[in-house]
Image (cartoon, helix red, strand yellow):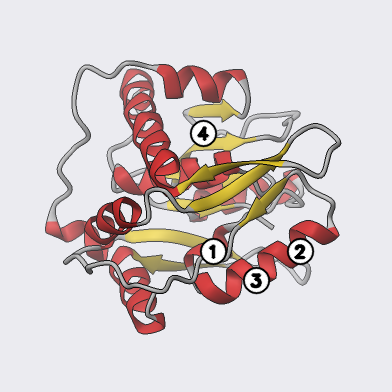
Amino acid sequence: DSGLVVLNDIREAARVLRIELLNQTTDVQMTDLSVNAEPPWGATLLSTYDRAFEFHARKALCGRRQGNSSLFQWHDYGSVWQRARRFAQGLLTRMQAVGVGKDAAVAIMAQNSEEWIVANFACWQLGRSVVAVATSTPARQLSSVLQQGNAEVLITDCNHASTPACLVLIISFGRDFETIEATQAARALPVLSPDTEDKPALVLFTSGSSGTPKGVSRTFREIHLMQRAYGV
């Protein structure tokens, strides 16, 4: 429900996500992410992404429907990765300004979209864990999910009647998202330490239909090894 399956099994997820999106008549499509040539692997997840997104810079990654037509405006790997970098710089500036903890995670609660992908990659470029929150999560369970994931920031396209106490910053898709992306950061992105590879990169939760949602985390290293195992 959040597009994060693309990060776990890219080839299969691209096929499933495309089918799911088309069935929902959504305005976003993903391309088939399988490739004919293999980019050079890096020592870390982020170094591999740097190389892979440069290697496939001109390949289409995702597209947004233009109005009510059947036409899509496509965005390539290179532009999405650079957009994520700009958003990461603006996000870092905003988080530092409001006092977000240095080890705090960022939750994303939104429908499938290019912004979801941008926000996810931006957080990873900062070495931050992403807590994927389903848009169907009831308000009574949201605080529990955020606390379990150690999230102090929420990036969302949903309206919230109340703000969970654990949150320091809420960023809404649209103008707020665009403002952060347009922020001209005076400093470069931080250089991530080797220890980052063993920190949580992604936290997924059960639906909570039978009780309190339970989370499972995957480290940067685990995601990197998983993608190498699938050869993508």
Circle 4 — which element? loop
Residue 23, labelled with which disc? none
Residue 195 in sight here: yes
The CA distance from mark 3 to mark 1 is 10 Å
Amino acid type at image mark 1: Val
Say which residue appears at 36% left-offset and 37% top-offset: 82
Instruction: Choose mark 1 or mark 4, whichever is in front.
Output: 1
Quick check: 222 above or below 49? below
Mark 1 / mark 4, whichever is N-terminal: 1
Mark 2 nearby-residue class (10 Å; few <14, some 14–19, many ≥20):
some
Say which residue appears at 79% left-offset and 58% top-offset: 22
Residue position for label 3: 15
Instruction: Choose mark 3 or mark 4, whichever is in front.
Output: 3
Mark 2 / mark 1, whichever is N-terminal: 1
Mark 2 / mark 3, whichever is N-terminal: 3
Amino acid type at image mark 4: Leu
Mark 2 / mark 4, whichever is N-terminal: 2
Amino acid type at image mark 3: Arg
Q: Residue 110 appears at what percent x and percent y? A: 66, 43
Lateral position of residue 104 relative to residue 190, left or right: right
Residue position for label 4: 167
Residue position for label 2: 20
Q: Residue 121 appears at what percent x and percent y? A: 41, 47
The CA distance from mark 2 to mark 1 is 12 Å
